[in-house]
Image: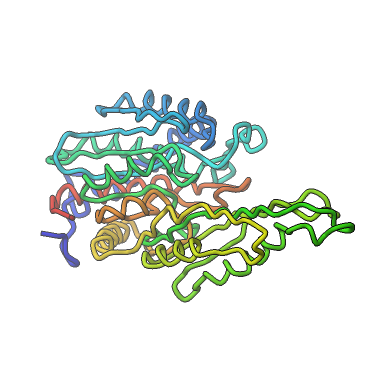
Amino acid sequence: MYWKQGSPLISLLSLQGGGASILDVWKYLKDKEKESIRLLKEFVELESFSLDKRGVDELGAHLIDVFSEFPVKAESLKEEQFGNHLRFQLGDGEKQILLLSHLDTVYPKGTIENMPFQVDGNKAKGPGVIDIKASYVMVYHLFELLQNINLKDYRIVWLLTSDEEVGSPTGKHAVIREAARSEAVLVLEPATDSGALKTARKGGGKYTIEVKGVSAHAGLNPQDGANAIEELAFQITNIVNFADHSKGTTINTGEIKGGNLFNVVADYACAEIDIRVAEASEVQRIQHAFNRLKVRNPRTKLNVSGSVYRPPLTKTDLADRLLQLVQSIGRHLDVSLQEAMVGGGSDGNYAAETGTPVLDGLGGYGGSAHSPEEFLWIESLAERTAILYGLIYELIQLGETWR
């Protein structure tokens, strides 16, 4: 039986005397703020750029060491090119609840020198502070709290991929495998800047358009050449028409390269194209459209590579029930939890392919992710950890099948 709208919340939210309420949990976590900041500083200062395997693996080893104080099973999932993924498991029950984070950030090694971790009033700043290292602090306190309850028939699995910021080319396989085993997937990506949860995300991909032409002198014999830049420009004007804003499908030409000198007919040009889709049906249409591209100038050659590699995360009825449950928990803390659809993707997109209900954006909130101004509202750590704990507690107490 599935959890139904209007079902009463279990004792955590309504205990009178004797036991801990969700408000008690929140107060306990707020009292842990200094420890939370100390942990966050540790994690942020261990830089973990997606393409720096050594840095990512050093962070992973540190997390294994930090979480060794809990009765968890820690496993490093080895990778050759990217960093190793991490899997932590608390409990040994048959039913699984999956938490998703990632190890990598968009900041190259050395960024910490010009963008140091710092606390500025109610904000914590630093590379990756909100996307996604705040989630490690949340899970640390979550595991502290979960040790004090009976997990019954459940196990909590925390999976951290090493390449999420570059589309999870290897991590997606671990995500899909673990999500398929789970009753629910809770993604600890940051909430929106306003604190809203993410119930839908666009899928996305990248295409590379390469044109090979024929070089010639632009003044002496231009007729002997075949201009790759001109051909590429024609292709781009065609490609932008693949967009369908009524369905949330967008096309962006993000990078162009080509030519050598102004007085030479260019023999090579290429462009990188970003694709975003809100509806699954659009994936096939877009891929078919790119596959049908043809050259206008027969003396040029066209090479098209790429795909829509990340499927959209669409809101389902089961995901909506998860949202209703977490909103009920939020109300006990006087926190109004809104929902949002966002253009960026996450590992939650891959998890949703399995049919398991996914709720994203359960991490802390702040702003300016992926920029020198990235920050976290420190108070969001306690708030969102309490809500996450309450959600997991309720799922365990309800004990219902969500698939």
- Which residue lies most toward the bottom here? 246
- Which residue lies most toward the left here? 1
Query: Quadrant location of residue 231?
Result: bottom right
State how many labels appear: 0
Q: Nearer the viewer, residue 70 or 290?
A: 290
Q: Nearer the viewer, residue 315 or 218?
A: 218
Q: Nearer the viewer, residue 250 or 225?
A: 225
Colour pattern: rainbow
Q: Does residue 383 appear anywhere in the picture?
A: no
| Residue drawn at (43%, 49%) of the image | 364
Query: Quadrant location of residue 146?
Result: top left
**Quadrant of the frame with the N terminus:** bottom left
| Residue drawn at (47%, 25%) of the image | 58
Image check: 293 left or right of 331?
Answer: right
Image check: 294 left or right of 291?
Answer: right
Query: Quadrant location of residue 262?
Result: bottom right
Q: Is residue 63 above or below residue 367?
A: above
**Picture coordinates of residue 85, whole percent (x, y):** 38, 33
| Residue drawn at (43%, 25%) of the image | 62
Image check: 277 left or right of 329?
Answer: right
Q: Does residue 295 appear anywhere in the picture?
A: yes
**Quadrant of the frame with the C terminus:** bottom left
**Picture coordinates of residue 325, whole percent (x, y):** 25, 59
**Picture coordinates of residue 138, whole percent (x, y):** 38, 41
**Picture coordinates of residue 317, whole percent (x, y):** 24, 65
Q: Nearer the viewer, residue 390 or 66?
A: 66
- Which residue lies most toward the right here? 220
| Residue drawn at (67%, 54%) of the image | 256
Image check: 172 left or right of 124?
Answer: left
